């Protein structure tokens, strides 16, 4: 339904990234609480056209339950607001707050949901996500459960917006970038770049640390992505062979040998979790979110610095 931007009431900030911030807001007429991504509009008309094109994809993706639903868009002279369903948290915050790795069985459900979302985007909309990382994988503990209610957000839009701006990527983003995206002589890449980023994301969530974490600059990260063997799950940890196999498939350096989604969907790891119910994962999320909230509350001491919301 149509609504006025003045009917939106600010509640609190949820976080900020490379191209804007995400805030929690109340839609006053319906009393619904939602998440709103607020981005500055550029003066470049070509770019604005592209934003509108991307928005089109966002709105049409309402038939995929592994994608954060878009509720509407506000366009002002200076800003684009994307209204989304409010999720409980993202994996980046969860990992940072808990300060311990995410168990493999939870990652099994995360993987199923993410691969379904990515292959939906490719098959139905012809879109490459380009920004797969823990902060774009959200979880919601309310409502119906599918793979623990894990959903992907920020496809197309943030990717294209960030790409078309001066290449100011944070150190975090460089680490998820597939080798073929870095090669300046060969800027040609496809959905398999997202498969690589998924592999890096899984290593980070399973170990609690981002590979290349000790690098001091983006340049160093990119040099290691290209020059070194791909990251792997550490040998001394208790991961199943099917999980290790899945991660190493995602992290095949030669993109021509790296599998696409239909092949990944045939892997033992995905087949195993497609058969299992996600009730256990959902219970793990509920408990983890509660713990993370307690930890955040205990860590924030002075009253005047707002405690980060989860
Ligand atoms: P980035 O993903 O690069 O960290 P964003 O601006 O896309 O930056 O998002 C900032 C934060 O907002 C994320 O860490 C995420 O936790 C939070 N967020 C984004 N969308 C939602 C949503 N729909 N519901 C709840 N939190 C969200
Ligand atoms: Mg994001």
Image (cartoon, rainbow, N blue to C red):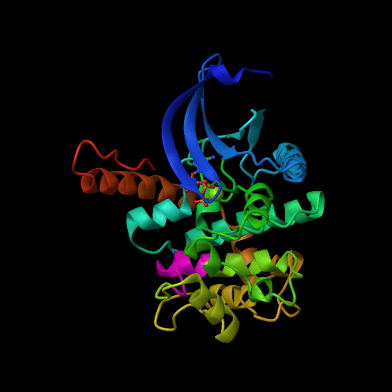
Residue 223 seen anywhere in this rendered image of the structure: yes
Q: Is residue 74 magenta?
A: no
Residue 80 in the image: above or below residue 102: above
Left or right, 127 with reference to 226: right
Q: Position of residue 125 (x, y in %)?
A: 79, 49
Q: Is residue 193 above or below residue 95?
A: below
User: 287 or 301, which is in the foreground?
Assistant: 301
Is 304 displayed left or right of 61 in the figure? left
The residue drawn where x is 61% and y is 32% is: 78
Q: Is residue 204 magenta?
A: yes
Residue 107: x percent and y percent?
51, 61
Comparing 177 with 209, the one in front is 177
Looking at the image, which residue is at 48% across and 65% down?
Answer: 171
Q: Quadrant of residue 159?
A: bottom right
Q: Position of residue 155 (x, y in %)?
A: 66, 50
Q: Is residue 163 left or right of residue 89?
A: right
Residue range of the region highlighted in magenta in the rendering: 201-212
């Amino acid at each position: 339904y149509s609504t006025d931007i003045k009917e939106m009431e600010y509640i609190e900030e949820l976080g900020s990234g490379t191209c804007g911030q995400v805030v929690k807001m109340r839609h006053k007429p319906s009393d619904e609480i939602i998440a709103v991504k607020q981005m500055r509009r550029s003066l470049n008309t070509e770019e604005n056209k592209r934003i509108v094109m991307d928005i089109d994809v966002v709105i049409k993706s309402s038939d995929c339950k592994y994608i954060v639903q878009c509720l509407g868009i506000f366009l002002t002279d200076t800003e684009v607001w994307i209204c989304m369903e409010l999720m409980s948290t993202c994996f980046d915050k969860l990992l940072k707050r808990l300060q311990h790795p995410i168990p493999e069985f939870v990652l099994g459900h995360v993987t199923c949901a993410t691969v379904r979302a990515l292959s939906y985007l490719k098959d139905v909309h012809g879109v490459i996500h380009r920004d797969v990382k823990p902060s774009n994988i959200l979880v919601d503990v309310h409502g119906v459960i599918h793979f623990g209610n894990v959903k992907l957000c920020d496809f197309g839009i943030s990717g294209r917006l960030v790409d078309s701006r001066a290449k100011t990527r944070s150190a975090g983003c460089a680490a998820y970038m597939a080798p073929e995206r870095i090669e300046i002589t060969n800027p040609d890449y496809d959905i398999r770049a997202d498969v690589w980023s998924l592999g890096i994301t899984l290593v980070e969530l399973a170990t609690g640390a981002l590979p290349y974490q000790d690098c001091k600059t983006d340049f160093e990260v990119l040099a290691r992505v290209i020059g070194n063997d791909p990251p792997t799950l550490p040998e001394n940890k208790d991961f199943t062979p099917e999980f290790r196999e899945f991660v190493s498939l995602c992290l095949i350096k030669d993109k021509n040998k790296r599998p696409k989604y239909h092949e990944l969907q045939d892997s033992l790891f995905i087949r195993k979790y497609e058969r299992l119910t996600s009730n256990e994962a959902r219970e793990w999320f509920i408990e983890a979110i509660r713990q993370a909230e307690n930890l955040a509350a205990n860590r924030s001491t002075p009253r005047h610095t707002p405690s980060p919301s989860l």
